[in-house]
Image (cartoon, rainbow, N blue to C red):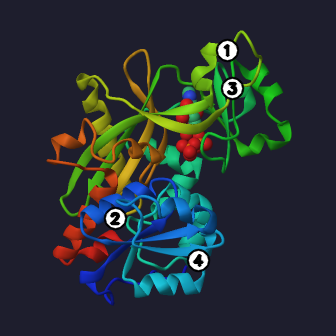
Amino acid sequence: MKRTETTAGYDQKQIAIATICSHSSLQIFHGARQEGFRTIGICTRERQKLYESFPLASPDRLIVVDRFADLLDEEVQEDLLRENAVVIPHGSFVEYVGADEILARFRVPTYGNKQVLPWESDRRKQHQWLIAAGIAVPRIYPTLDAIDGPVIAKLSGAKGGRGLVHARNRQEIAKRIDPALIDQYTLQEYIFGTRYYPHYFYSQIRSRLEMLGIDRRDETNIDEIYRYHDLIDRPPTYVVVGNRPVVVRESLLGGLFDYGEGLVAASQRLFAPGLFGPFCLETVCREDMKFVAFEVSARIVAGTNLYPVGSPYSCYYFNGEMSTGRRIAIEIREAVEQGRLEEIVT
Ligand code: ATP
């Protein structure tokens, strides 16, 4: 593995915050600018016009590339190092560049712990982490024969809700998925209830967990299937198209907070120094009022884009506007002020 450069050679008064122009980057640039950082966007030509068009969120400088994966080019990496850049990873960053490539070839200081990548990208390891955190999870059926109820089959490597198939039982799922690909599917118990995707932030600098918001995804076409189920007979699809703001009953908040704390504590045991910065759980609240989590995202999630000026929870931690993007910038600023930047980048 190629070693990440340290920030020791950086001019710490001139740190720039950089990310790929996609996913939650407007929020990241906006928040970084609010905290007085210079910002750099890695952008493809066709997106350039859009990312130059937001007076308060456009990056100060664009590095234009043909493909986002060109971020790995030596030239681009050297440029970012000269700029004293700290890169903020988001979902599209991992998707476009690839977890293995980031670990093997990307050496620009990146906010967060890169060791989380193998734990997040492998569904089996992720399941192990959730269990170690004391979080209720759906049952995993090891074989088709083990299925004893409604099931959702997930293709390994698929993202954004692609490649999901659900069925009422073993016989039905066997007809809906290609038997030749059976080894590539995770067969998960289908959980019935209401979805809540809480956004957390664990601060290394302040040693505290914050709950910065909650969203729910809009997914094609499952979310409005009740409107046309008698008109068409089409398989449900779960591809994400947007997000909605939600809050939970205050009496349920403690359960979600405990889950966040459990994830951080387990990560510190499994891959020290563990998970820090923004992260999210995807949960379903069952009829017995228990949250079951089927996924963890170990970085800023697109659902936080709902709250560029703050959420119904962030206002209990901070006066004034506070997005997850700005929260990251504050963490970096405080780390610089305390001479601790090296602790929060890998
Ligand atoms: P991403 O990695 O982008 O979050 P993914 O492709 O890994 O997406 P999941 O997030 O696991 O897919 O699931 C996508 C959607 O499928 C969820 O948002 C939810 O609506 C539904 N879903 C997933 N697992 C379950 C489950 N066990 N029970 C009920 N619904 C589920």
Q: Amino acid at mark 4?
A: Leu
Callout 3 crowding tier (Cα within 10 Å): few <14, some 14–19, many ≥20: some
* Amino acid, disc 2: Pro
Q: Which is more N-terminal, label 1 or label 2?
A: 1
Label 1 vs label 4, nearer the camera: 1
Is 236 placed left or right of 132 in the picture? Answer: right
Q: Which residue is mark 1?
A: 228
Which of pointers 1 and 4 lies earlier in the amino acid sequence? 4
The residue carrying mark 2 is: 273
Q: Most extreme residue toward the left, as rendered?
A: 319
Nearer the observer: mark 3 or 1; the answer is 1
Instruction: Determine whether the beta carbon of the residue marked 3 sits less than 8 angstroms from the nearest atom of ligand 1.
Output: no
Q: Quarter of the picture for ligand 1?
A: top right
User: Which amino acid, by three-letter code, is at mark 3?
Assistant: Pro
Where is mark 3, residue-wise? 236
Residue at figure coordinates x 34%, y 83% from the top left:
7
Q: Nearer the viewer, residue 285 or 9?
A: 9
**Marked residue nearer the N-terminal end (3 or 1):** 1
Residue 143 visible in the current orientation: yes
User: Disc 2 on helix, strand or loop?
Assistant: loop
The kind of residue tagged 1 is: Tyr
Determine the residue located farthest toward the bottom in the rendered image: 9
Residue hosting label 4 = 72
2 and 1 marks in contact (CB < 8 Å): no
Question: Between marks 4 and 3, how big is the CA–CA gap?
Answer: 37 Å
Q: Is 6 rendered above or below residue 197? A: below
